[in-house]
Amino acid sequence: YGSFCGDRMLERRIEEVTQANQKFYAAFESLDIMKMDEVWAHQEYVTCIHPGWSIRSDWPAVRDSWVLIFNNTFSMKFELTEVMVQVAGDMAWVICVENITSQQSDEPQQAKVLATNLFERIGDEWLMIHHHGSAVMG
């Protein structure tokens, strides 16, 4: 009986984390820094590694990296595949393939990025504390 309750709670948390992850990609697609602000924990221990970039740590530096990306991107569309969600207590991580169609200039670009998104449950919300994207070749 106890494990049944535990399973139900785990299922609910996996659902919440899945929604938090979708909210992150919705914010990314919107290219709206205010929406991205809502997704992240504004903590000094947050980190972000964009494909081909060095690590950004602490919220102001992480936020600046999004501002830079948003200012230089005309449009961004994500289709997520191979999504894996894991929850352990108040920590959770999502590993997925970002199938991206973006436009910086005239021609739309296709890219595949393997991403790890780490979330922490703060109060009753799951907030992002780490995003790491690395390009998948081929």
Image (cartoon, rainbow, N blue to C red):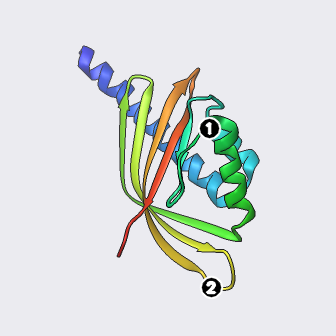
- Determine which quarter of the picture holds residue 135: bottom left
Q: Is 19 placed above or below 13 here?
A: below
Neighbour tally class for label 2: few under 14, some 14-19, many 20 plus, Cα within 10 Å: few
Residue located 58% across and 67% down the image: 77
Q: Is 62 displayed left or right of 52 in the figure?
A: right
* Residue occupied by mark 1: 40
Q: Name the amino acid type tagged 1.
A: Trp
The one of 61 and 33 positioned closer to us in this rendering: 61
* Residue occupied by mark 2: 107
Residue located 67% across and 75% down the image: 104
The image quadrant where one finds the C terminus is: bottom left
Residue located 24% across and 19% down the image: 3
Could you tell me if the residues under marks 1 and 2 are in contact, i.e. CB atoms within 8 Å? no
Residue 65: where, in percent of width, then height? 66, 51
The one of 8 and 85 positioned closer to us in this rendering: 85
Residue 69: where, in percent of width, then height? 67, 60
The secondary element bearing badge 1 is classed as loop
Q: Name the amino acid type tagged 2.
A: Glu
Report the residue that reaches farthest toward the top.
2
Neighbour tally class for label 1: few under 14, some 14-19, many 20 plus, Cα within 10 Å: many
Q: Earlier in the sequence, mark 1 or mark 2?
A: 1
